[in-house]
Amino acid sequence: MRSWRAGLFRAWMKNIAALLVGIVLLVLLESLLALLGVPSLSQEDPFVGFAGKSPLFVRDDNVENLFHLNPDKAAYFNQQQFEMPKKKGAFRILVMGGSTTYGRPYLGKTAFGAWLEKLLERYVPGLDVEVINAGGISYASYRLKRLLPELLNYDPDLVVIYAGHNEFLEKRTFDPLIREPEGRRRLRGILHHSRLYSELYRTITKLRHHKGGAGRTVLGEDVEAVLEQVGGPELYHRDSRFREGVIRQYRFTLGDMARMISRRKVPLILCTLPVNLSGVSPFKSEHRAGLRKEEWQQWQAAFEDGEQKSLAGDLTGALNSYRQAERIDDQFAELSYRIGKIYLRRKRFQKAYEEFDRARQNDIVPLRALDEFNVIIRQIAGDRKIPLADIETFFRRISPGGIPGNNLFADHVHPTLEGQQILAWVVLNAATDAGLVPLSAEQWQGSMVDARAYLSSELAKIPERYRARGLWGVGRLYYWAGKYPEAERALKLAWKTVRDEAEIPKQLGSLALWRGAGFEAMQYFVQAEQLDPGDPWIRFGRVQALLMQESGRKALDLLDETTWPDGMKMRLDVARCRALFQAGQDRAAKALLNKLQQVETDVPALEKELADLYVLAGRKQEARMHYLKALRLEHHPAPDAELEQWWNDVGAHQLKKNGNP
């Protein structure tokens, strides 16, 4: 009996000893990997990776201890320089974010970081304030997080984060993470702290990817915005899974940035994100999925009736018609915006706010931060006891009816010059209340009357040309995002003062083409070409203006006498085909059209141009096919009905005009 028990005890001891040896080996391996600098997966972003790595700032070759902006980043960040180590007694503030932090539509010298520096130096005599402006144009939070380790090495005394408007600009894949069960997600979170597990995971992942498996998105060194691709806003469609992934990534990234800053024992202020609700319509609207042809037709009739009644001043009738459309489809963002406008005119401000906010949330091109982002910012600030600059609430409080609009914004998200000052004011309120700057809350309160007068006087000193260049920035942004009427208004105002930038008349020419004003477009393109004779897109604009004026022979001459870059071939062939038809060279035009038929394109605008060319060629079937393809690429809810409408309005008439049955 004793022998049996002793044998069992020895077996247990062997097992325990083997287990302990295994644990010791694991600990030794973990320690060795740590000494070798192998990072754990917990230190990596599970949502995206990056190809390449270049610093934001580089050491100056000629001046010791001086850092300046990396020339490779000049398209995204303000030019600036600073000393490292910093000067004795200097108070260094790091502001991080996107283009609002940068200072858009102006420059960094009127961004909130600059006003924060001026206010602190004015009310703390002798204080040397240095602001590092890490506001990157089109930079989302995950790109800012990648810069953070470098920026924390520059010894900031305070970090301010104002980020969240650019989260939807770049394509990423979230499916594997979104579909992951909660239990597995928690287990993964624990295992990712092990360097040994991390190395095994990386090895297996590399092998799987080598065989063609899917992994996290790897982004390039520079921003690759969807809006900058051919097609622009047309490439955006409602995608609830992508939206969920973006929200989850934003929560993870902002929380991780807060942890990184806390570990370095640097004070942090988080800022909520206000947006222009009443002054900017949605960038793109899309009907709900599953809308039937008959429903779309009913919706369209109700929407158009509401529009007519609104223009006639019948607000009650307009609201009734819009509500009728809403009962059919309540996801079309522009409809909510129109309803908000009706409530605003009737001074029912809470109702107006709700509709404007619904329009923002349903915008298919989400260039304004979602409500969920401000919820996340407040939660992280509350959970981690981080001071909060609640700019969204402040902007609402000082806006008519509590609805921020063009009173505070130059465009959809970028504050006016005064708005940037207010942003700095709210950040300074938070900083003094939390004791994060060498200015007490009492001192700041006592300086506020003078501060208002000071900021107002500084605002009055800003030159007219600087303001006009800001309007150019607004116009450029709206043009980029496909909001053409708003772009044209801003660009025309800018062109009155800024007469030495070719881009302004170039874009005004394109907008005149969009309106069908060929002669006006030609005038703008000629002015643009005088400023920049080598731009092929300006010359191509002249070609399009000639085609709009039915001057096919002149267009052909211009096409033939110009050396064009290879990347324009598709557009040039489409233009040449139209010019040949206009010049009466039908045989050559049809031969070129047959070649174009072999080219695949997923850009709706080009498909519609091809449809027009097939009409000119008298080929009804191909014309209808290409127009239908364009409608489907646009995710039109009733493409067949819209095709018939186009054919009745345009196609059949043009076909008959050309002498075709």
Image (spheres, rainbow, N blue to C red):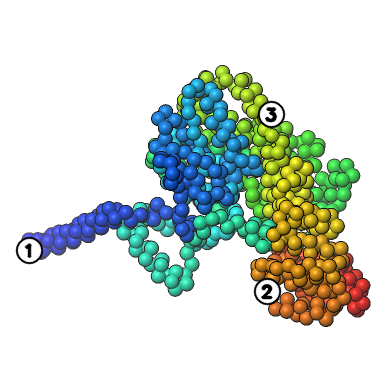
Residue 333 shows in the view: no
Q: Amino acid at mark 3?
A: Ala
Q: Nearer the viewer, mark 1 or mark 3?
A: 3
* Residue 193 seen by the camera: yes
Instruction: From the viewer's side, name the closer residue of 383 and 112.
Output: 112
Give the image location of residue 562, x and y in percent: 73, 67
Q: Residue at x 7, y 63 (%)?
A: 3
Q: CA distance from mark 2 to mark 1?
A: 83 Å
Residue 241 x/y as whole percent: 58, 58
Mark 1 surroundings: few (<14), some (14-19) or many (≥20) residues within 10 A: few
Q: Nearer the viewer, mark 2 or mark 3?
A: 3
The residue labelled by disc 1 is 3
Identify the residue at horizontal 78%, vertical 67% (top origin): 558
Specify the quadrant that holds the N terminus.
Answer: bottom left
Image position of 586 with respect to 433: above or below: below
**Distance of mark 2 from mark 3, alpha carbons?**
55 Å
As helix, strand or loop, the secondary structure at mark 3 comes to: helix
Q: Which residue is mark 2?
A: 600
